[in-house]
Amino acid sequence: MELTVEKYDGKIGVAVSGGIDSMCLLHAYCSINQDLTVINVEHGIRGENSLRDTDFVRAYCKLNNIPFLTRSVNALSSAKPGESTETCARRLRYEFFDELLSSGTVKKIALAHHADDNAETVLMRIFRGTGLRGLAGIGNRSDYIRPLITYTRKQIEEYAEFHSVPFVTDETNLSSDYTRNYIRNELMPVITAKFGDVPKAIIRLSECAKEADEYLTSVCPKFERKSDGLHIKNFFGYPIILQKYAIMNAIRGLGYLQDFENRHVESVCELKSKPNNTVINLPFNLVCVKYNDGVIVTENNGSGFCPLPFSEDGVYSFSGICYYVKKGEGMIKGATLDEDKLPDGCVVRTRRDGDVFKRVNGKTKLLSDYLNGEKLSRIEKDSVLVLAKGNRIYAVFGLDTADEVKITEETKNILHIIREYL
C-alpha cells in the first residue's frame, strides 16, 4: 500500500502530532525528498501525555535530520466566549500555522486529514443542522494542502504497517465522550457494516455540495466593512438561501469559522418581521442588528468604555475610532467648542438613559431622540462617546457640539474634537 503525495517547489510545513495519520504523511513526503519542516503544536490539554507526544516527534525529527518547530499553547484557559476546548485548540493551532505562512518560513502547510475525517466532519455537521457549506466537508485554503483526503483510515493503517512507520496513540481517541470520537467509534462501524464504503460516498456528496456552495457564494449579497461592523444592504430583498450565505460570509469576514449552526443563521433571516434595531445574539459574542432594509454583524462590545475625565489634550479611543482633543482656531462644523464655557468635572463616556442635548441653535431634547434623528443604527448609538456633566451633554463626538458651548466672537480658547478611524 502506497500513499501518493505531490512534490512541491519550496519548503512546506507538515503538521505532525505524532499520531498515525500525520506520521504517515511525514513518511510519504520524506520518501520523495520533499523540502519540509515539521510543525508540532502541544495544546496543553492532556498533561504529561501531550508533552510525551511532542517529545516523540522531536526525537523522530532529530534522528532523521528533519527541521522541527513546536509551540505550546493552553487551549483549556484560552477559549473565547462560547468556544469549546476543541475549537479553541484549532484556532490556536491555525494562528501558529498562519504566522509561519505570513513570515515565509514555509510556503504551504500539509495537514493529514483523510477520508474518514471528512466523513466524521460531515456527519457532525448534519447532526448540528448544517447547510450546503457544511456538507462540502473539510474546506480548503490556498496555503493549506490535504494530500491524504481521498485515502481511508484503513489504507493509512496498511501503509504504516507495510513501512513500519512509528507513531503514538492519543488515549482520548478511545473515549466516546467526545462527539467526534462517538461518531468514529460507535456510529461509523455500524453504518459501514450496513452501507459499505461510507467515507468515499460522503466524499462524492461533499464534491457536489462544494460546487453548489461556490455558486451561491458568488451570487449572494456582499458586506461592506464600516466602523460599527459589517453592513449588508437590501439583505431581505434576496432569497432566504442567499441571505444565509451572506451572513456566513460576514461571520467569516470577522474571523470566525467554526461552531455556527444553521439555526443561528436562520434567526438572522427571521429579523425581517422584527422592528428596526432589533438585536439578536450569535455565538462568539457576536450580534446582528436589523437596520432599515439590511443587517449589521459585529462583535458585541457591551459598553466597554470606562468614563474618563475630559482634558484639552485628551485622547479617547472606542469601537475602532480615536478622538483627539486639540486647541485650535476657526470653526470645524460639529467638532468645535468654547473651552471656557465648559463646567468643571466634565467626563467622556457612552450614552445613558435620561441624557439631554441641545445642538447649536436647536431645541433641548433627549439624546436618544437626537440620535434617532441622525438615523444611526443601534450599534452606532452604542458606540457614540459624549462629553457630559451629569445628564447634560456638551458634545456628541463625531457628530455635534451643544449650543451652551458654541464659539462666538468673544471666544478666547477654542477646542476641536478630531476623529480618526483606527
Image: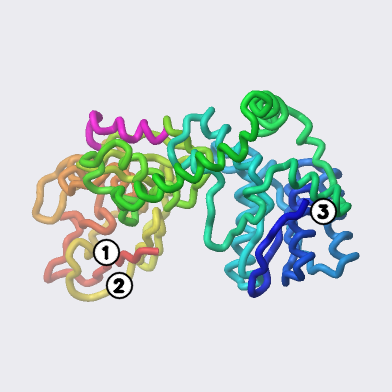
Residue 358 as seen in the image, left or right of residue 270:
left
Q: Position of residue 190 (x, y in %)?
A: 68, 23
Q: Which residue is mark 3?
A: 54
Amino acid bearing label 1 = Glu
- Give the distance between the C-alpha atoms of the residues marked 2 and 3, in whole angstroms: 59 Å
Majority secondary structure of magenta residues: helix
Residue drawn at the location 18% of the way across and 74% of the way down: 330
Q: Are marks 1 and 2 in contact (CB under 8 Å)?
A: yes
Q: Which mark is residue 327?
A: 2
Q: How is the image coloured?
A: rainbow
Q: Are marks 2 and 3 in contact (CB under 8 Å)?
A: no
Q: Residues within 10 Å of mark 1 (few under 14, many from 20)?
A: some
Q: Residue 410: which quarter of the image?
A: bottom left
Describe the element under mark 2 as helix, strand or loop: strand
- Give the distance between the C-alpha atoms of the residues marked 1 and 3, in whole angstroms: 63 Å
Q: Which residues are magenta?
A: 264-276
Amino acid bearing label 2 = Lys
Mark 1 or 2, which is nearer the eye? 2
Residue drawn at the location 45% of the way across and 42% of the way down: 209
Residue drawn at the location 12% of the way across and 71% of the way down: 409
